[in-house]
Image (cartoon, helix red, strand yellow):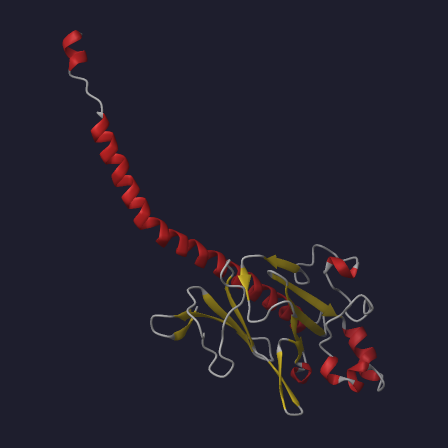
Amino acid sequence: MRVQDEKIKGFNVLELLIVIAIIGVLSAVAYPNFSEWRKDRETRSAVVKIKSLIEGINSQVQRGQYAFVQVDVDEDDGLIVTSKGMKPKTLATLLNNGESGWWVMPNERCKIVDEADEAYWDEDPDPDRNQIIDLDKIEVRQIVLDNVATTWRDDVGAVCFGKNDQWYSGNGELVSSSGDDVIVDSYLFICNRSNTRSQCDIDNVTGEPTTEHDHLYVIEWSRFGNIKLEKWNKRDAEWIEQ
């Protein structure tokens, strides 16, 4: 037994230090890649959630549950994205009243409500609206995303869709003015939020980033509610459909 015991060997201190050094080198090389991969996964996950929300509320327009819907994007040290619905009966009342805001202020059809406008949207899941919402209705919901940013700060943008594509409209940061015309933006840029980046830097003319972005996506839609997702490939300086 003693002879057998003498043949059993372990690591000495030098060997242990070499192993620790090797692990340290491998970790130092691998960690940046893993960290960037994790940031991209987090950003993409947030983008997919927003895309799913837009698709979900639009599907209910096509099914007739709502006649007019809104996607509201509120930037407040993160993004709060809310889908809201107007029922056919409510829209019919607005359409039949020639003095309603629908006709008097058509640029305000896609209304960004405040506390005085509780009755405009039939279903609004924003907890500040104090409406009783059926939580089983996943098409009318709100998501809070702390790890991503868009192209504006401390403001709200909204886009609205209806079964009649002429009701396609926007408000706030999701419209652009051109003379007397108001152009509804058909895209939302999303990038990773960090201590050094609080918004996405995008050229309004080219639609390309003006600073280097490692994790930059764009959700695009049509007035009919068709949705497309693209990612910026900085190596080839082009958008790639996902």
- Residue at 77% x, 84% y is 105
Q: In this view, does 145 lie above or below 85?
A: above
> Where's residue 168, x and y in %?
66, 81
- Residue at 37% x, 75% y is 237
**Looking at the image, which residue sits at the far top?**
1
Q: In which quarter of the image is residue 97?
A: bottom right
Placement of the N terminus among the 4 image quadrants:
top left
- Residue at 74% x, 84% y is 106
Q: Quadrant of residue 170?
A: bottom right
- Residue at 44% x, 59% y is 40
Q: In this view, does 174 lie above or below 54?
A: below
Q: Quadrant of residue 222?
A: bottom right
**Looking at the image, which residue sits at the far front?**
196
Relative to residue 81, is residue 99 drawn left or right? right
> Where's residue 11, x and y in %?
22, 25
Q: In this view, does 93 lie above or below 41?
A: below
- Count of numbered circles on the image: 0
User: In front: 225, or 108?
Assistant: 108
User: In front: 14, or 156?
Assistant: 14
> Where's residue 153, x and y in %?
60, 68
Relative to residue 212, is residue 133 drawn left or right? right
> Where's residue 235, x and y in %?
34, 70
Placement of the C terminus among the 4 image quadrants:
bottom left
Relative to residue 51, is residue 71 drawn left or right? right
